[in-house]
Amino acid sequence: MSPTPTSPPDRFIPSNRPILGAEELAAVTKVLESGMLTSKSGAGNFTLQFEADFAKFVGAKHAIAVNTGTAALHAALLAFDVKAGDEVIAPPFSFIATTNMVLLNGAKVVFADISPNTFTLDPEKVEAAITSKTRAIIPVHLYGHPTDMNPLCELAEKHDIAIIEDACQAHGSKYRGHDVGTIGDVGCFSLYPSKLITTGEGGLITTNDNLLAERLRQIRTHGEIRPYEYVQLGHNYRLPEIQAAIGIEQLKRLPDFLKSRKANAKFLTEHLNDIKGVTLPKEASWATHNWYLYTIRVPSPRSRDKVQKTLYKAKIGAAVYYEVPLHLTPIYQQLFHYKEGLMPESERAAKEVLSLPIHPALTDEEREWVVQQSRQALA
Ligand SMILES: Cc1ncc(COP(=O)(O)O)c(C=O)c1O
């Protein structure tokens, strides 16, 4: 353990910070020199390389690069023809892109509550939510902790329902030894700057299904199969070549990022585990966490908000993901009038969660500072 810092660090410690360097810069330069910034067929050379590298990394047959994680989710729903009259089951404890994409396809979101230990979909709640209209389930591997997939896969098979994994926070997370995003029918990843790796904006869809991959590639470029021949509705969800080139370099760094996150999570657990009444994050026995977020629970009578404010004053960006569960967010209240109390575990989590920085850009001194200040704020 390095000496305990006695004063705040020079720079604010955000909850996540991307690491980009000379390799990314050189890759961008290469694209600029090539003059090929995108490909109207859907994927230029850098994008094809990035897709092949990511597919190999997660162990999927196909990876289709798109321009956001939101686009990945939307394209996946389109590939399953999710439309008005269909229902899609999703957790209310997630980022709003998960369910907005369902609504923008005209389908109904049916919320199922989370399991309190993993913050991910509770399979029993999912089973209770299935109807004859259920077309898909979207398990969200929140904070990088995988959802318990086997019971969901059994339900999906029994009822002929698609599984679209929202793995936007879960690059490198594994469920029973398999990478998330390869367990359901498709997996959707985000490459936003706060994520495990970034291309600025960007996304990836993974699948082992050849036909689905073909459909997804068409959807990425207006449903086109040959120049100006359109066989389905689609979008312009193409990833620019500059971003793909950055992605190739970021992916090379991912194994080191994951190691560093794991070490930082272990360090925090070792130094915070004696604080009574605060719950630290744990991996389920079947899970490999990527430690995207280190999310503790700060239940009352302590005030999570007060702890967060104290840490901010100490230059630590302890973050709350998410303060309001989706069913209680203003636009969903206005549209659907959900009642408070409907999703008790998600509502409780929203009041208690606090994520402490463990990203790979943390210095040893910053890590010490996070521990020291968290202990003080939680005391
Ligand atoms: C769980 C989840 N789903 C979907 C998204 C959407 O990804 P993006 O911001 O790349 O569109 C995000 C990212 O913010 C996310 O965290």
Image (cartoon, helix red, strand yellow):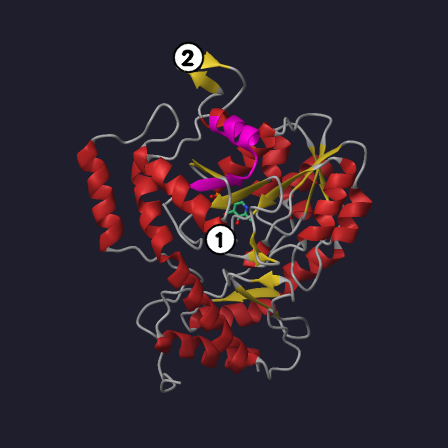
Q: Element under label 1?
A: loop
| Residue tagged 1 | 171
Q: Which residues are magenta?
A: 202-217
Question: Which residue is depicted at the point 43% across and 54% down?
Answer: 194
Horizontal and vertical percent position of residue 84: 69, 25
Alpha carbon separation for disc pair 2 and 1: 35 Å
Q: Position of residue 302 (x, y in %)?
A: 64, 74
The residue drawn where x is 39% and y is 65% is 360
Quarter that holds the N terminus: bottom left
Point out residue 197 in the picture as x, y percentages from the top left corner: 40, 52
Residue at the spot of label 2: 228
Q: Amino acid at mark 1?
A: His
Asked where in the image residue 239 lies, by quadrant, the reply is: top left
The residue lying at 42 percent from left, 60 percent from top is 16
Q: Label 2's element?
A: loop
Label 2 or label 1, whichever comes before in sequence order = 1
Residue type at mark 2 is: Tyr
The correct choice, above or below, for 68 with respect to 119 in the image is above
Magenta stretch holds residue 208: yes
Relative height, residue 323 to residue 35 (above, below) = below
As drawn, which residue projects farthest toward the left?
33
State the residue at coordinates (20%, 40%).
Answer: 30
Mark 1 C-beta to ligand 1 under 8 Å: no
